[in-house]
């Protein structure tokens, strides 16, 4: 099974994005079946880079990763909504407010990854995780929505979804009571998600 895993660069004053660090770790074992990509935290450019990668790689599944401050564990996103509404600008200063992602797209798309089964798999391997019903309205949601739009309109056999990860310890040293997770546990979690998809692909169980 050909899988594309994406993450994001640092943004909003942070020097680190855990999702980028996970991608760096996964890239060491990337091969013809596992592909990795770090996306810019820019609404338009992230969409462009993702689509270019889909055209080039033709993945059967996309797992997109992003940082979500304030969350305590791995969160598997259930839905992406058709709106960009940024509380702060992206990394090039663009700040869309109440802007549709795709005028011709659905109001929302549900993930096509088996998030409940993936959740059970993570918990069975002692990874703290839960389902989330909001990917926000920032670049993470934008990327999840666009991946699912591509799947619906052009790549009908492609599955896609989004996973948010919390801060790592280095990011919370000066943030009082901010939750975090060890990077090694995040890497293990994503490896488990990849393994689940690979092991269940032939059985068509998702």
Image (spheres, rainbow, N blue to C red):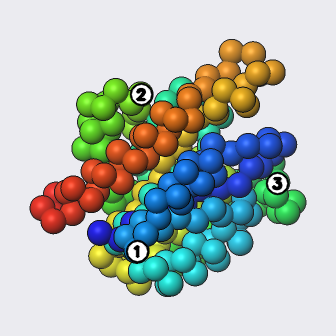
Left or right: 176, with 126 as reference point: right
**Taking the image as drawn, is residue 137 in sight?**
no
Residue at 68%, 45% (x, y): give it.
17
Question: Answer yes or no: do the residues labelled 2 and 1 have beta carbons within 8 Å?
Answer: no
Return the disc, 3 or 1, that comes first in the chain's sequence. 1
Return the disc, 2 or 1, that comes first in the chain's sequence. 1
Mark 2 and mark 1: span between their CA atoms?
Answer: 30 Å
Residue 72 percent coordinates (x, y): 54, 26
Circle 1 SS class: loop
Circle 2 SS class: loop
The residue under label 3 is 89
Q: Seen from this angle, which residue lies furthest top?
A: 177
Question: Answer yes or no: do the residues labelled 3 and 1 have beta carbons within 8 Å?
Answer: no
Mark 3 and mark 1: span between their CA atoms?
Answer: 36 Å
Eyeballing the image, is 122 above or below 135? Answer: above
The residue under label 1 is 32
Eyeballing the image, is 133 above or below 161? Answer: above
Left or right: 26, with 92 as reference point: left
103 or 54, nearer to the observer: 54
**Taking the image as drawn, is residue 161 in sight?**
yes
Q: For residue 128, which numbered disc appears in the image?
A: 2
Q: Seen from this angle, which residue lies furthest left?
A: 203
Mark 2 and mark 3: span between their CA atoms?
Answer: 31 Å
157 or 106, nearer to the observer: 157
Residue at 34%, 27% (x, y): give it.
126
Quadrant occupied by the N terminus: bottom left
Residue at 27%, 50% (x, y): give it.
196
């Amino acid at each position: 099974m050909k899988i594309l895993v994406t993450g994001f660069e640092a943004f909003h004053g942070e020097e680190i994005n855990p999702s980028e660090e996970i991608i760096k770790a996964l890239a060491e074992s990337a091969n013809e079946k596992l592909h990795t990509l770090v996306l810019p935290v820019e609404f338009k450019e992230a969409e462009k880079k993702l689509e270019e990668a889909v055209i080039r790689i033709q993945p059967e599944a996309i797992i997109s990763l992003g940082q979500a401050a304030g969350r305590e564990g791995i969160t598997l996103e259930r839905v992406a909504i058709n709106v960009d509404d940024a509380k702060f600008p992206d990394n090039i200063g663009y700040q869309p407010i109440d802007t549709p992602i795709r005028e011709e797209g659905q109001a929302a798309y549900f993930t096509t990854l088996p998030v409940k089964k993936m959740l059970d798999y993570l918990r069975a391997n002692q990874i703290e995780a839960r389902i989330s019903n909001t990917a926000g309205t920032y670049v993470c949601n934008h990327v999840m929505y666009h991946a699912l739009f591509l799947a619906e309109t052009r790549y009908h056999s492609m599955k896609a979804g989004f996973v948010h990860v919390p801060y790592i310890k280095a990011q919370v040293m000066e943030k009082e009571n901010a939750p975090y997770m060890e990077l090694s546990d995040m890497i293990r979690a994503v490896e488990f998600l990849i393994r689940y998809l690979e092991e269940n692909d032939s059985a068509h169980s998702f």
